[in-house]
């Protein structure tokens, strides 16, 4: 289904782009978008194993009839998902330019385009993570078809948005990641509403992602300030330093704030592989 959606999306935005530009210009923009998509998919690959690993635990607790433990496990999974997805999303948003400049080697107008696409896709990371988590939770409860229906609706929203937005010369290829964002927003909303209706005790997903998100925003402010200071104030042009330094400093700030604000508990860590060692390292 995702492959079909991707093919349709590509045909739609390429057809729309060719209305206002040459084939070569459209191919260049398509290549830049495909590159930013690969970066977007990287954090999502780390989130999928977490959501899958929560299903057996939830199923076992449901079998025992312990709905309180089920909700506790689901909210722990939400905190872990937020702990991983939030810094990735904020990092890709605030450091879109140095990341695409380093990894893609872009300059000038191509760098500007790549950075704008990457920043939009960065925001999508959090909503994609919520979709993966809520899909897994509903599947663990035996509601296999409901997530599929919601994702189908989101896919339709995406295709319509891409068709309308990419056909606007002022928006162009940027309409594609905007369509992706609208798609995940739609599925997230539908999944949260569906969970409240069909689950005995629906977990507070957004509430448990909020604290990691606050930590990520503080990290993002420091990371962006570091990058701005290096490139604008100090005039450093080395792409590796301009990208690595903000990421490294931001990571330290995130670990510190996450531990201080207790964005994750020891019980949450125990759901992860090597969770006990991670909890001891963070002094939880």
Image (tube, rainbow, N blue to C red):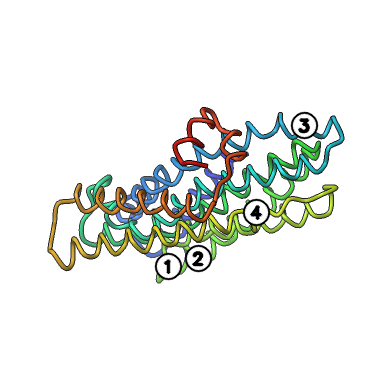
- x, y (%) of residue 86? 49, 53
Above/below status of 151 relative to 18: above
Question: Residue 182 vs residue 136: left or right?
Answer: left
Query: Do the numbered discs 4 and 1 sit on residues whose CB atoms are within 8 Å?
Result: no
In space, the residues marked 1 and 2 are separated at their CA atoms by 6 Å
Above/below status of 254 relative to 73: below
Query: Do the numbered discs 1 and 2 sit on residues whose CB atoms are within 8 Å?
Result: yes
Q: Nearer the viewer, residue 5 or 69?
A: 69
First in sequence, mark 3 or 2: give its number: 3
Residue that badge 4 annotates:
154
- x, y (%) of residue 107? 21, 56
First in sequence, mark 4 or 3: give its number: 3
In space, the residues marked 4 and 1 are separated at their CA atoms by 21 Å
Is disc 3 surrounded by few (<14), some (14 to 19) or many (20+) residues within 10 Å?
some
First in sequence, mark 4 or 1: give its number: 4
The residue under the point 50% across, 61% down is 214
Helix, strand, or loop for circle 4? helix
Q: Quadrant of residue 270?
A: top right
Is disc 2 surrounded by few (<14), some (14 to 19) or many (20+) residues within 10 Å?
many
Q: Is residue 117 visible?
A: no
Residue that badge 3 annotates:
59
Is disc 4 surrounded by few (<14), some (14 to 19) or many (20+) residues within 10 Å?
many
The residue under the point 62% across, 37% down is 51
Identify the disc placed on residue 171: 1
First in sequence, mark 3 or 1: give its number: 3
In space, the residues marked 3 and 2 are separated at their CA atoms by 42 Å
């Amino acid at each position: 289904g995702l492959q079909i959606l991707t093919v349709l999306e590509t045909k739609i935005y390429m057809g729309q782009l060719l209305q206002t530009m040459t084939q070569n210009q459209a191919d260049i923009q398509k290549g830049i978008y495909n590159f930013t998509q690969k970066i977007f998919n990287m954090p999502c690959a780390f989130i999928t194993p977490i959501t899958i690993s929560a299903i057996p635990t939830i199923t076992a607790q449901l079998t025992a009839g312990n709905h309180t433990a089920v909700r506790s496990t689901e909210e722990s999974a939400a905190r872990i998902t937020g702990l991983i997805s939030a810094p990735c999303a904020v990092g890709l948003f605030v450091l879109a330019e140095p990341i695409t400049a380093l990894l893609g080697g872009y300059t000038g107008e191509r760098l500007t385009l790549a950075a704008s696409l990457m920043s939009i896709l960065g925001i999508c990371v959090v909503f994609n993570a919520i979709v993966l988590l809520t899909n897994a939770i509903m599947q663990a409860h035996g509601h296999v078809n409901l997530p599929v229906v919601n994702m189908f609706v989101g896919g339709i929203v995406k295709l319509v948005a891409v068709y309308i937005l990419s056909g606007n010369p002022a928006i162009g290829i940027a309409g594609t990641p905007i369509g992706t964002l609208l798609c995940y927003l739609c599925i997230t909303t539908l999944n949260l509403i569906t969970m409240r209706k069909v689950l005995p005790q629906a977990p507070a997903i957004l509430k448990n992602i909020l604290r990691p998100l606050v930590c990520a925003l503080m990290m993002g402010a420091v990371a962006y300030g570091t990058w701005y200071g290096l490139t604008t104030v100090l005039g450093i042009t080395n792409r590796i330093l301009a990208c690595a330094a903000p990421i490294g400093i931001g990571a330290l700030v995130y670990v510190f704030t996450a531990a201080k604000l207790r964005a994750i508990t020891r019980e949450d860590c125990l759901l992860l592989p090597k969770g006990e060692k991670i909890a001891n390292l963070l002094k939880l």
